[in-house]
Image (tube, rainbow, N blue to C red):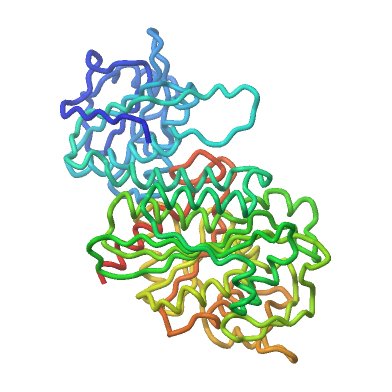
Amino acid sequence: MTIKIVQKRGLASVKNLKGSHHLFVLSDATSKDFPFIKELDRKLKRTDKKIVSLAKAPITIETQDGRLLSFVVLDKKNNTFQRHTLIRKALQPLLLENPEVISIAVFGGEDVKEINARAAIYVALINSQTLPSRKKENLKKNMKSIEVFGIELKDNFKEEIAITTGNTLTRELTMLPPNELTPSIYRTKIKSLAKSNGWKHEEFDMQKLKKMGAGSFVAVGQGSEPQDAAIVHLTYKPKQKKKTVAVIGKGICFDTGGHNLKPARYMLGMHEDMNGSAVSLGILLTATLLKLPVQIDCWLAIAQNHIGPKAYKQNDVVKSLHGTTIEIMHTDAEGRMVLADTLTLASRLKPDMMMDFATLTGSMATALGDRYSGVISNQPELACLAAGAGSEAGERITAFPFDEDYEEDLESGIADIKQCTLEGGADHIHAARFLNRFIENNIPWLHTDLSSSNRKGGLGAALSEVNGFGVNFGIQFLKSFLKK
């Protein structure tokens, strides 16, 4: 994070606004005494609109002296997602020109100005980061500074900066081409992150997992050469901690579907199937930067789902670390297989709560599209807490049922449980019921199925298709959980 934030308590004026790219964030209580009001009035009159229309669609104006001005009105009734979305749309024309400096001017009452300034800084930071590109000519310049007028906060936007750092890490990892993020490469990157952030680092490689009896994870990892799959365990331990939480992430670096091979249309983009692990790392990094008073044990299930002579197949029966036997029904349901043993390992340390992140099921995307992600929990109060945290973060979450009779569909004639069904239906709930079987010690658990990790045109605060969804939500959820 190299972008400098300069705060200026005084209100913006035509004279003190430097540079040529300016965002004006108005509230429904803003009087008409802000800079460039005449230019805005002319634009509104020409398009037969009133200033109140800026609460639905921002307006961008280019002045005669070459300045680019964006105006948006944020109503008190706006929730965080609406606020982020409107600011993103207002900032997009400015950011497309790759300015080195932008100015953000906030107007209205003090409480409204703080809410709007925090939202605007977060959106500006999120969309000013350098993300992976392998184009011969990369025209994007790095933004150097953001000037904020109308408010001065003592924390200098510490939380917004930390969440942006975690979100950027998540997007960087998720966007890397699959030949640049094999399990071996990923594990090396994680080890480096652990060293630079002071995290305890431990790996369970394939050889160790075989000896331990983690047959569910090994079944997936054994199909790839080299057999470089592993469960990686990282620990952030602050000097003072209120609780201990396990954060678990699915890290399938590429998913072919295995023997049940995906068609090209659905295999494209499967390098992003490690997004859950990237979200978990983003949360861990953000929590470390914010020095949250919670010990986090981060468990990353890193593997690939490939085809080979040793690849697992339909009707195989494998024995998990938990001791539960699993009948394989579909090799493309590999995510729940690697997570099963990882959840068992995480639960054996008896944390106060467990939360996992995974791009797990197509049925969650069918249920919600790519605008929301879904959660399922073995404790209803955690699901409610998650929905509230998502609303606060501007990363929308909804809860799904967890009733035990769904598990009847997973009854097997030869093993303790079927991996999934071939009849379709509520696979996102079936997957949660399956995963729950491998959690020991009755640990409270929240499962997050990341159906909104990639959306064309961006989502909420993020302009990029890979949006880092889950980092902000995860941090807000942890903060809420610590207050319980």
Which residue is located at x 62 percent, y 54 percent? Answer: 183
Left of 33 or right of it: where is 360?
right
Q: Is residue 357 visible?
A: no
Q: Is residue 373 visible?
A: yes
Q: Position of residue 336 (x, y in %)?
A: 61, 71
> Up-down: is 217 above or below 433?
above
Q: 225 or 301, which lies in front?
A: 225
Quarter residue 251 falls in: bottom right
Q: Quadrant of the N terminus?
A: top left
Which residue is located at x 48 percent, y 83 percent? Answer: 440
Q: 341 or 381, which lies in front?
A: 341
Return the residue found at the far right: 309
Which residue is located at x 80 percent, y 66 percent? Answer: 260
Left of 42 or right of it: where is 434?
right
Return the residue found at the far top: 65
> Up-down: is 404 above or below 14?
below
> Up-down: is 127 above or below 224?
above
Q: Position of residue 181 (x, y in %)?
A: 62, 47
Q: Position of residue 286 (x, y in %)?
A: 36, 51
Quarter residue 405 falls in: bottom right
Left of 460 or right of it: where is 25?
left
Q: 79 or 293, which lies in front?
A: 293
* Number of marks present in the image shown: 0
Q: 47 or 412, which lies in front?
A: 412
Which residue is located at x 66 percent, y 83 percent? Answer: 319
Q: Quadrant of the C terminus?
A: bottom left
Q: Position of residue 367 (x, y in %)?
A: 60, 64
